[in-house]
């Protein structure tokens, strides 16, 4: 059945209305650019910026971008300290007609910037993105035609105030801006924008946290971290070639073109953020990227000691993740960390086998315990604690833990007494090892044995029991490669077992069964009975 004619008429009217509004906005924008007498039409475009329909707002954003970029490109906006707009009406003869026009449009430009900053908090992402991109176009246009007076010849004046307003809009305290910040990453790839943004973030963090008196600000801190994590630092000064605002001639001592100044700003930004109290989930996010994305770009990486030691003392997964950063500082920057191995020893509990970062933890633990200069009692304590924990560990973890223990014994032959003690009594005796002792020097691991490994030879999983039987014969000097076992999961173990079952047929009864139940049984009322 064909739709009634009235619906077609309504649809046509709606389309015509959309086209009329867009045409009206674009026409007025062209008139404002071409004819100064039409300057007051800018107020009509501002009304569309505050319209209820998103399509009208988006169209008005594009018009404002065209208008003010064109006016700045021609030098029509007033340059220098901006007089009050009321002075144009009260003072006669002080300003020429061109200056009055420039002052008027400069005020309208400021109004436009305020409206665009408000639109960055709009519920429609397309509106947000349009407002952000237009503001960054204004930053670029102001850089080419500064609106503030130049102090001396060849002085470079970056439009920090406009960029500061953009950064403040991105670092909202009330709304999650992560999606818009990801769009802003395009501009962070530009070296001058990145340099000034880092300084502005440092100022914002100091100002907001001081006002909040160290209270947690989850939304704000998440926005800050989202912005910080989108900053990709260059590794060499020769890479600093991509600038939003191009300069003529030699850059000289211009800081955005110097890698050392980038690193100082980067360091100040991160240290300023990390010195304040953070939510526990943010500690994890930061520690995951710290050793690769932050420490290599700091002027003085040792300044991160306080943050890393505090994170290491928290315990749980946060302590596991802090190991990466501490490893870099200990091995590359000669950090002397007291009681490091004692704390590493205390991180070993049953939860570590189920942690998300298990592979990373055991990889680093293997590196820390690889030195042949470690005391025997310390290595023995780690081997014994892992053996005790292995009694309740899942099979997938055991296939990694057992070779880990064997490697410890191979590196430190004095620990072989744990698996072969000739002077041991034949009668059973109590294990002297103290599992509850936090100090590895006092746990009496060297007086004990790894009887847990012999117990695991009776494990229900054949791969585990086979791996545990390695101690029944002399250990080879060649260490086991555990790199492929670090991330070995229960799912992979299950899949491997299924494949093995397909290759090897299961033993069955050799006589076939003709029926399920044989004999004189009867089914009475749904119940089986034997006569």
Image (cartoon, rainbow, N blue to C red):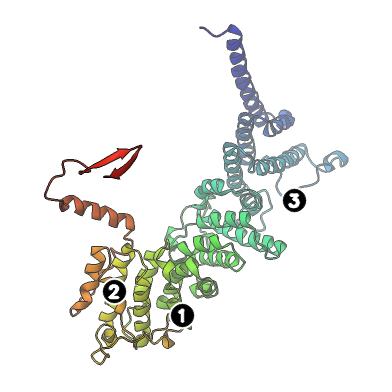
Viewer-side residue, 395 vs 381 = 395
Viewer-side residue, 401 vs 3 = 401
Quarter of the image for residue 107 reads top right
Q: Nearer the viewer, mark 1 or mark 3?
A: 1
The residue at the point 37 percent across, 68 percent down is: 392
Q: For numbered disc 3, what is the local secondary structure?
A: loop
Give yes or no for contact between labels 3 and 2 (Cβ–Cβ under 8 Å).
no
The residue at the point 60 percent across, 56 percent down is: 156
Quarter of the image for residue 84 reads top right
Q: Position of residue 72 (x, y in %)?
A: 64, 41
* Residue tagged 1: 436
Q: Nearer the viewer, mark 1 or mark 2?
A: 2
Compared across the picture, whether 368 is left or right of 158 comes to left
N-terminal label among 1 and 2 = 1
N-terminal label among 3 and 2 = 3
* Residue tagged 3: 81
Q: Position of residue 317 (x, y in %)?
A: 47, 66
Give yes or no for contact between labels 1 and 2 (Cβ–Cβ under 8 Å).
no
Within-10-Å neighbours for mark 3: few <14, some 14–19, many 20+: few
* Residue tagged 2: 455
Q: Quadrant of the C terminus?
A: top left
Q: Position of residue 319 (x, y in %)?
A: 48, 70
């Amino acid at each position: 059945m064909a739709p009634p004619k009235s619906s077609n008429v309504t649809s046509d009217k709606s389309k015509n209305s959309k086209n009329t509004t867009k045409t009206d906005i674009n026409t007025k924008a062209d008139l404002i650019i071409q004819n100064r007498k039409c300057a007051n039409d800018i107020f009509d475009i501002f009304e569309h910026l505050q319209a209820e329909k998103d399509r009208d707002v988006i169209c008005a954003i594009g018009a404002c971008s065209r208008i003010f970029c064109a006016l700045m490109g021609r030098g029509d906006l007033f340059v220098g300290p901006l007089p009050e707009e009321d002075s144009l009406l009260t003072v006669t003869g002080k300003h020429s007609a061109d200056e009055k026009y420039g002052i008027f449009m400069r005020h309208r430009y400021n109004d436009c910037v305020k409206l665009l900053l408000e639109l960055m908090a709009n519920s429609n992402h397309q509106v947000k993105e349009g407002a952000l991109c237009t503001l960054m176009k204004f930053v670029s246009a102001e850089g080419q035609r500064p609106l503030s007076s130049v102090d001396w010849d060849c002085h470079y004046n970056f439009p920090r105030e406009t960029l500061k307003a953009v950064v403040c809009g991105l670092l909202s305290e009330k709304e999650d801006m992560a999606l818009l910040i990801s769009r802003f990453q395009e501009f962070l790839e530009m070296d001058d924008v990145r340099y000034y943004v880092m300084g502005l973030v440092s100022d914002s963090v100091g100002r907001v946290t001081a006002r909040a008196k160290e209270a947690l600000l989850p939304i704000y801190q998440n926005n800050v971290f989202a912005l910080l994590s989108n900053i990709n630092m260059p590794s060499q000064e020769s890479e600093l070639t991509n600038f939003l605002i191009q300069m003529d001639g030699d850059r000289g001592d211009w800081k955005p073109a110097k890698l050392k100044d980038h690193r100082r700003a980067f360091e100040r930004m991160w240290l300023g953020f990390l010195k304040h109290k953070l939510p526990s989930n943010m500690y994890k996010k930061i520690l995951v990227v710290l050793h690769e994305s932050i420490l290599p770009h700091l002027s003085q990486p040792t300044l991160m000691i306080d943050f890393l030691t505090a994170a290491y003392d928290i315990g749980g997964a946060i302590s596991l993740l802090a190991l990466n950063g501490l490893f870099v500082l200990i091995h590359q920057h000669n950090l002397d960390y007291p009681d490091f191995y004692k704390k590493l020893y205390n991180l070993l509990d049953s939860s570590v086998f189920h942690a998300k970062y298990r592979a990373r933890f055991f990889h680093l633990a293997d590196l820390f315990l690889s030195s042949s200069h470690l005391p025997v009692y310390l290595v023995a304590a780690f081997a014994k604690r892992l053996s005790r924990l292995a009694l309740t560990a899942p099979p997938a973890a055991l296939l990694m833990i057992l070779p880990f223990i064997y490697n410890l014994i191979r590196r430190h032959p004095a620990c072989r007494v744990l698996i072969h003690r000739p002077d041991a009594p034949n009668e059973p005796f109590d294990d002297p090892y103290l599992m509850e002792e936090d100090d590895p020097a006092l746990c009496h691991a060297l007086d004990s044995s790894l009887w847990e490994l012999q117990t695991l030879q009776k494990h229900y999983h054949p791969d585990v029991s086979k791996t545990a039987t390695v101690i029944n014969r002399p250990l080879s000097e060649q260490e086991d490669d555990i790199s492929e076992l670090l991330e070995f999961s229960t799912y992979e173990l299950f899949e491997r077992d299924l494949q093995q079952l397909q290759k090897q047929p299961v033993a069955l009864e050799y006589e076939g069964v003709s029926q399920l139940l044989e004999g004189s049984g009867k089914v009475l009322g749904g119940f089986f009975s034997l006569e």
